Amino acid sequence: MADLIDDVMWESRENDTNLDEGTSNTRGSGVDDDFAQLLEEMETQLYHGCIFPSLEFLAKLMHIKVNNKWTDSSFDQLLELLQLAFPKGNKVPFSHYLAKKKLKSIGLGYELIHVCKNDCCLFWKEHDSLQVCPVCKESRWIDKNTKGNKVPHKVLRYFPVTPRLRRLYCSTHTAKNMIWHSTIRSEDGVMLHPVDGEHWQDFDKKYPDFSSKPRNVCLGLTANGFNPFGNMCNPHSTWTVILTTYNLPPWLCMKESSFMFTLLIPSPKAPGKDMDVFLRPLVEELKHFWVRIKDAATNTFFTMRAMFLWTINDWPARSSLSGWSRQGYRACATCNEDTPSYRATNKVVYIGHRHFLDANDPVRKRLDFNEMEETRPAPRHFSNDDIQEQLGRLLTRKPGKHPEHGGGEPKRQDYELNWSKRRIFYELEYWSSLRLKHNIHLMHVQKNVDESLLGTLLMDDKNKDTSNAREDLRILNIRKNEWLQKKMVTSFIDPKQDTLSRNLVDNSFVNL
């Protein structure tokens, strides 16, 4: 712990008079003066004759509390016992509150931001002093007539990015890894790291000033909801927004210890179309991210910039972050307005995917899909200019879930396609030029596809071979041998069509 505090305090102990005049408006070193007191406590024994420094003992004790999920009251009782057991004059704090207060200076704090009851806005910056929401006029407080401390309806917890990135360079243990992406790249065409991908290389060409300085930071974002009570019957949805740093090598950048917890979005409902309201603090910080810091590995000062490359989410979260709805006849964000869709018996399905194949692919000529060859060309590519033109046609709608101010899902005009709004990421000057803005998390897609495929083969509760699916074949007038068979007033599936022949089974085992 002494090394950690020494690394973080390094910048504050240096004489900053050698900084460039042009950076006078940037943020300072950001290292709190309370670290001086912490360093002093690192040299203070827990009690006379003890081998433990008081601060190190407290840090280990708090670590045990977190790992074993002790309650605050049980921890208070333990501290009282230690106070009695150790000699008088010991440095054991009297309560959990005092213990947290002592370690607060070495930790990374967060900002509490009040949120409108209907997710219309944040009571932040220009709205910080307001008592009612400027959109829906709802009170900021649960009980506005309370004489004591008033309780807000919702509280967003924002963990600033700047101090976290600064500490990656202030520590000698991590600063050397922050330029890994620029020193070791794949030379045989094998993608070992996102830096070897086409998107990153295209980004470097478009922004050479940024890419020429390897200590600039490239970030990725992911967001997802979870039920904090562990009970799926309780419809609570708390969302988290997490950043990862792609400067680090692949065995570190996707490690849990490298993730930066950025936003904790309050429940009980998912943010949905109002996700931009909660992302405002993060985007505002990234828009003006020019920070003068010191690199502990080289003992030099430099100005760090950070850019946001993409998001990685499942389908529902992608819809909230991209602004393109995942439902309806145009749900595919890649095909856009050319999405091949069909209204089935009880849902919208997406068919005809053979036209993604190469023009000379033999699968295009097979007749066992829909008894026709696939002659359509591959879907057209929508450029950034095409997307900007579509976004320019969107109507302006108020945020929030108030029934009189944008509550629910607003009815879109036909020319708006599946866009719900122009997302806040477009306020970043480079966002519209990125080739790959949103990624789908492979785990979710693979899980859903595998469950459906195996469920259909094994005829379990995930089976997709239902009577509705057979009825859709009849409506499409394809695969007549798989239609529902009529007998009197009932319909049934012919078991012959679902039975594997003995020869096929024997050949399958021989091939295995």
Image (cartoon, helix red, strand yellow):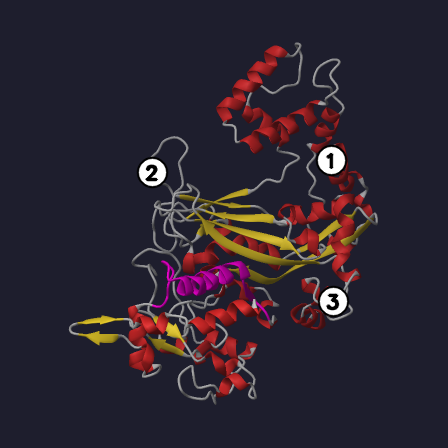
Classify 259 as above or below 357: above
- 156 left or right of 462 in image: right
Q: Mark 3 points at which residue?
A: 209
Which of labels 3 and 1 is toward the front? 1
What's the CA distance linking mark 3 and mark 1?
33 Å
Residue 216 visible in the picture: yes
Q: Is residue 238 magenta?
A: no
Marks 3 and 1, the one that precedes in the sequence: 1
Marks 1 and 2, the one that precedes in the sequence: 1
- 475 left or right of 211 in image: left
What's the CA distance linking mark 3 and mark 2?
52 Å
Label drawn at residue 143: 2
Q: What stretch is highlighted in magenta?
A: 436-465
Confirm or deny contact between disc 3 and disc 2 (CB under 8 A): no
Q: Residues within 10 Å of mark 1 (few under 14, many from 20)?
A: some
Residue 122, given in percent of the width and then of the height, sits at 45, 51
Marks 3 and 2, the one that precedes in the sequence: 2
Classify 120 as above or below 212: above
Q: What residue type is labelled 1?
A: Ile
Report helix, strand or loop for mark 2.
loop
Which of labels 1 and 2 is toward the front? 1
Residue 199, given in percent of the width and then of the height, sits at 65, 70
Which of labels 3 and 2 is toward the front? 3
Q: Which image quadrant: the C terminus?
A: bottom right
Residue 299, given in percent of the width and then of the height, sits at 83, 47
Q: Name the residue under label 1.
A: 5
- Residue at 74% from the left image edge and 37% from the top image edge: 4
In the depicted view, which residue is nearer to us: 398 or 155? Answer: 155
